[in-house]
Amino acid sequence: MAFKSLLIMCFFIIFASLLAPDVLDIWASTQKNDFRRDLAKEWSDSVGEISRNIKINEIREFSERLIEGSSSEELLEPLVKPVLTLNAESSSMQQEALDEKDIEVKETEEKSTQSSIENSTLLSPSSTTLLPPSSTTLSTATTAVTVTTTTTFVDSEPFIKARRKGTPEEPLRILAVGDSLMLDFQYGLERILEPRPDVKIEGRGALGFGFTVPHWDWEDDVIPDYNLMVGKVRPDVVVVMIGANEFQGYAIEGEDLESGSFRWSEVLTERAHDAISHWIAGGAYLYWYTTPKMSDPSYLTVDLNNIWDAVVSDWHPKAEMVDSMKVLGDEEGEFRWNMEMLDGSIIPLRKEHGVHFFEVGADGLSRQFEEILEKDGWLKDLMPVS
């Protein structure tokens, strides 16, 4: 019986290898840079040569083109990464201009004070009381500086959020994307938000997914999948939570990628920008939840959230960060295992490995998100007015 099971397993391994030699090559390149990678490369090269000789790959690609060609979903062009309007040089020049304006104001104050002293002496030589500087002169100078500063920085955020309010006739379309953390989160969204008639949730969290997880081919699988889901759902709002699998020290295309390294940050930054450009290609607004802090300090959530924050800041005012630890953390925003309920009872919040959260956490995050959507004008506040 065991021998039969072994034969069946070997058959499927060989068949799968022949069917997808390119995937096999990627898998081989992701192995640790030692004898394991050498053995995997030997296998992938041999099987890949056989597969290409009998043209299995071409047959599969032809079938995929037929399937994709029959799809009726609209493919949207990704957005171009925004260019920052204020760089270090322009900020420095602006600061110099403000410094010069401050000097002019101070000179005006000194001249005004000196003039007041002279006038006071001429009008009342015996008096030792000094008149205050002219308030009109100072007010005018200050107003000039204020107008210049206000004109330079214009926040257009109110014009981006809440392009429309969800209604029972046309519910707000929310696309939830990410890894297994989003799987936890999206079930809470379905429990808390989807019963509303003005909301429709499309949950696409993926178990084991990650921007640096090599088993997911970025260009051939992930990005096309994002294009298809955005074209199908046409979301008004995209909500993201990701990060559980970014700390494993993977190898991508033969390149070792250690968590916390400069190259790790670079890859995550590039792929986060790439993902956002597709998620909001149809005009959606993005809410990116921070990766929750975890019990194991080797999960570099602070480093990871610094990357997310920097990327999302570049997409402002089309996107913003939301702090998950306001719900999942303690009063200081630090990791906690349990949550105290209103009746004083203590219930588990995080699962035994200290990464994922139970339903109470998912529901708490979902209520937080509902409040944000109501505050930003996407949904009507259903709470009764007392």
Image (cartoon, grey):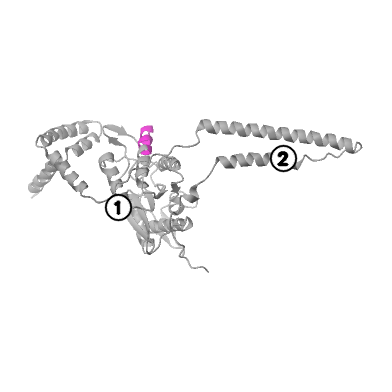
Q: Is residue 144 left or right of residue 291?
A: right
Q: Earlier in the sequence, mark 1 or mark 2?
A: 2
Tally the numbered discs: 2
**Corner quadrant of residue 101:** top right
Q: Is residue 109 above or below residue 292?
A: above
Circle 1 residue: 232
- Res 351 visible: no
Task: Please check the rendered image and state whether residue 114 is part of the magenta-colored stretch, yes or no.
Answer: no
Q: Position of residue 355 (x, y in %)?
A: 36, 49
Q: Is residue 372 left or right of residue 109?
A: left
Task: Please check the rendered image and state whether residue 265 is part of the magenta-colored stretch, yes or no.
Answer: yes
Q: Position of residue 51 (x, y in %)?
A: 12, 37
The chief SS type of the magenta part is helix
Q: Position of residue 241 (x, y in %)?
A: 37, 49
Circle 2 residue: 138
Q: Residue at x 32, y 46 (%)?
A: 76
149 or 45, nearer to the observer = 149
Q: Residue at x 53, y 44 (%)?
A: 154
Secondary structure state at the residue bearing disc 2: helix
The amino acid sitting under disc 2 is Leu
- Range covered by the magenta-colored residues: 259-269
